[in-house]
Image (cartoon, rainbow, N blue to C red):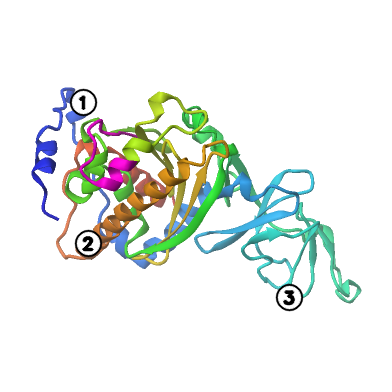
Amino acid sequence: MPRSDAHEAAVERAPAVSDAAERAPLGDALEPNLYLEPEVVRLEQRAIFERTWQLAGHVSDLTEPGSYLTTEVVDQPVLVVRDHDGEIRAFRNVCRHRGSRLLAGSGRCGKAIRCLYHGWTYRTDGTLIGVPEGRDIPDLDKSRLGLHQVRAEVFCGLIFVNLDPGAEPLGERLGGLAERLARYDLPSLKRFGRGGDVQPANWKVVVENYIEGYHIPIAHPSLMRLLDYQRYDVEVFDDWVWFEAPMRDKPSDNRLERVYQRLVRPAPGLGPEDQRVWRFVLIYPNTTIDLYPDQVNTWRLWPDGADVTRDDWGTFRHPGAPASSRVVQRINNALNSTVLKEDVDLVDNVQRGIRSRGYHPGPLSQREAAVAWFADRIRSDLERGPA
């Protein structure tokens, strides 16, 4: 897309980096084979996705004992349930008898989880309690046939699961993030939307597009009208990245954007300093949290082969927000839908381009510091290999 004069001027006004250390070259972006080869996808399943914390849902999805949700860690089905002691537990979503998936979707399972194939039945703590015609099964020992446990942890109201029994607790890996999220009161939010999409690119291409603002002046005219690109900032930590995107004071020349600027108000718990800033978080490797004054969005990405990304998303709002905020949320979602369409074209172009023989990634901009961090993490995890 051709750049307008305003876009050109914004790029030209980009502040000079004065600190010599900050001007030092960043690490290299990933080599193209890591986005293209099916063998890499298979290795990522074991070396990355099955060893990291994966977003499964929100506490509002499991409000009552016996409520459950199902999710996948790429191709590994997982069942998450609130047991009758109020604890959130997770299991591999597979019956110990003949491998049938136990539950699908979300809902209520009552006091027990019953396999629809042969009726093997489990308590919500995973204990096997019922086997039809069990007397006809030699050496049946129900105490050894409980569901396979999966680690579950609630972080700021978000439910995560991890297939690696030896993984460090999520809260310890995300030191400092909980304090930044506290003002948004994520545990109290209520879900008002969910969905899923498919993007025509490797999942890492999609993540990298999310974690850099370098492309905004070229590819996202609406964001350039809304956000102060000069103050768009990124902080990189061990397991998460934080973005601050202050809004412009100048009213947009686009009517819908101008209405959003005029009507947006901070949700309950947020202060005036939160009214005119958008914040974004990536939790390694594939979970994002978008923090707006009016709502919070979550997004999880995972591979479907080497050149397709599947995602699921959720939108949440504060139950104490005034009814007038619904209008702002509809506008926000409309604006983000436009940006997403632009991003889908961008990642599609990248996926097509990196197939070119002889391509090697060029040096990264300081605005792509998170891309360098992400590439280092991916290389490290792939070299370490499966658990």
Residue type at mark 3 is Tyr
Q: Which residues fall within the magenta stretch?
A: 242-259
Q: Residues within 10 Å of mark 2 (few under 14, many from 20)?
A: few
Residue type at mark 2 is Asn
Which dot, 3 or 1, sits closer to the camera?
3
Query: Residue 37 placed where, x, y %?
Result: 33, 65
> Along the horizontal axis of the image, is 37 left or right of 270?
left
Q: Residue furthest right?
A: 135
> Is residue 27 visible to the viewer in this orientation of the structure?
no
Nearer the observer, 67 or 375: 67
User: Where 276 falls versus 324 (above or below)?
Assistant: above
Task: Give the Cα separation between the discs numbered 3 and 1.
Answer: 62 Å
Q: Mark 3 or 2 closer to N-term? A: 3
Q: Residue furthest top?
A: 19
> Is residue 7 visible to the viewer in this orientation of the structure?
yes
Q: Which residue is mark 1?
A: 21
Q: Which residue is mark 2?
A: 349
Task: Give the Cα separation between the discs numbered 3 and 2.
Answer: 45 Å
Task: Give the Cα separation between the discs numbered 2 and 1.
Answer: 33 Å
Nearer the observer, 204 or 299: 299
> Along the horizontal axis of the image, is 39 left or right of 118?
left
